[in-house]
Amino acid sequence: MKVSIIIPVFNEADNISELIRYLTDFGSDSLEEIIVVDGGSTDNTLLSAKEAGATGVISPKKGRAAQMNFGASLAKGDLLYFVHADTLPPQTYIWDILDAIRSGFDMGRYLSTYDSNSWLLKMNALLSRLDTFGGMGGDQTLFITKNLFQQTDGFDGSMKIMEEFEFCARARKQGKYKIINKPVLISARKYDTNGWFTVQKANYTIVKMYQKGASQESMVSKYKEMLNYR
């Protein structure tokens, strides 16, 4: 089995090269490719990605869901691994994913840890051990067989926010889900900029809006109103 890594990006020139080299170094022969899908960056993200050895493409449509779908449509591997540009999986990521698939799982994620000494973020990391709706947001990365991804028709390309939560909840109805007992390292930049309580309040607000059927436009607007983030 081969793994195709898909990284949706927007203005990630400061992070993308290091991530690609890291994923390549620990990818082994089972790493088929790294596809970086750009949503219209105004910096050198795509050039940096290509120079680091990834396949760099521009998505026909901006938005994480649409970008990940486009990357998946180009992927040659049997397994898809979606990684955010500010996240580092464990060095054993390839073997972890292959072992999960060979054990009968179809999709899954890791636990969380943050590049911060904040005790509040350490609490967030502990909560990622729970199999809850809040753990399906994508920061913990997501692996899935290409077959299951195609059976579920992928992410909802019309979504601009909450797309990973919606997809995981839907895909889990058709496939077996694994939480790997190892953490990915997530950037704390959003918390550093806004503060833990502000981020938590924003996340809680958006989840409640989503559960009540709020429109994508209203949720995106509210999130931007509450947080100063990219």
Image (cartoon, rainbow, N blue to C red):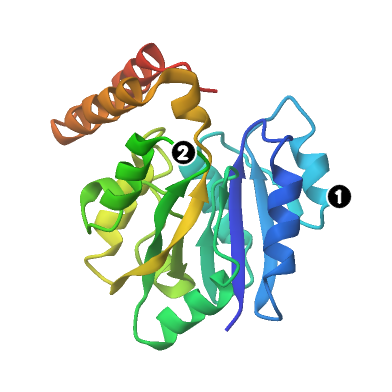
Q: Return the residue nearer the eye: 45 or 73.
A: 45
Q: Is residue 103 above or below residue 115?
A: below
Q: Nearer the viewer, residue 86 or 118?
A: 118
The residue shown at (53%, 39%) is 187
Density class for disc 2 (Cα within 10 Å; few <14, some 14-19, many ≥20) is few
Disc 1 residue type (three-letter)? Glu
Alpha carbon separation for disc pair 1 and 2: 33 Å
Q: Is residue 224 above or below residue 147?
A: above
Q: Identify residue for label 1.
A: 51
For numbered disc 2, what is the local secondary structure?
loop
Please name the amino acid that badge 2 sits on: Asn
Task: State the image coordinates of residue 75 (x, y, percent, origin top left).
Answer: 62, 65
**Is 8 on the left-hand or right-hand side of 225?**
right
The foreground one among 179 and 7 is: 179
Q: Position of residue 192 (x, y in %)?
A: 49, 25
Residue sitting at x 65%, y 80%: 30
Q: Which residue is mark 2?
A: 117
